[in-house]
Image (cartoon, grey):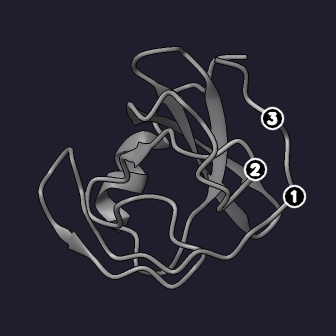
Amino acid sequence: MVNVVTSKFKRTVENFVCEHCGVQVTGNGYTNHCPKCLWSKHVDINPGDRANYCHDLMQPIGIEKHGDTTNVVHKCVKCGFTKHNKSTSEDNFETILRLSQNPVPN
């Protein structure tokens, strides 16, 4: 199956149960990972489009800082795709702190 690139961003408001830790997450249309464990799911080609065929879990593997922005680096456990997602104020600070100790692979 081939992924087709669609619009650059589609706001999709969805609540979900984290498939890694089981917490109930209330989405706001920009939510792309669990705020408790920071795991994500490989569902998009472009943010919000739900057009990716992989649908496996994405492990948080590190943190990158760009000025005042903190990004969580995720890597798909199935296909190896790597994605950077903005951290939010709801994210578990202890988990972010622990991840910040990991060098982010290039």
Report which quarter residue 36 is drawn in: bottom left
Q: Dot 1 surroundings within 10 Å: few (below 14), some, or many (20 or more)?
A: few
Image coords of residue 43 (percent x, y): 52, 44
Give the mark nearer the N terminus: 2 vs 3: 3
Q: Quadrant of the rendered structure where residue 101 is?
A: top left
Q: Is residue 31 left or right of residue 65?
A: left
Residue type (three-letter) at the residue carrying disc 1: Lys
Q: Position of residue 76 (x, y in %)?
A: 48, 26
User: In the image, 84: left or right of 42?
Assistant: right
CB within 8 Å, label 2 to label 3:
no
Q: Which mark is residue 46?
A: 2
Give the structural element (helix, strand or loop) at label 1: loop
The mark closer to the camera, 2 or 3, is 3
Marks 1 and 3 close (CB-CB < 8 Å):
no
Classify mark 2: helix, strand or loop: loop
Q: Residue furthest front?
A: 1
Vertical relation: 92 (above or below) 65: below
- Quarter of the figure with the C terminus: top right
In this orientation, which residue lies closer to the viewer: 94 or 24? 24
**Mark seen at residue 4:** 3
Quick one: quadrant of the N terminus?
A: top right
Density class for disc 2 (Cα within 10 Å; few <14, some 14-19, many ≥20) is: some
Whole-angstrom CA distance, mark 2 to mark 3, is: 10 Å
- The residue at the point 54 percent across, 30 percent down is 53
Residue at 63% in and 53% down:
85
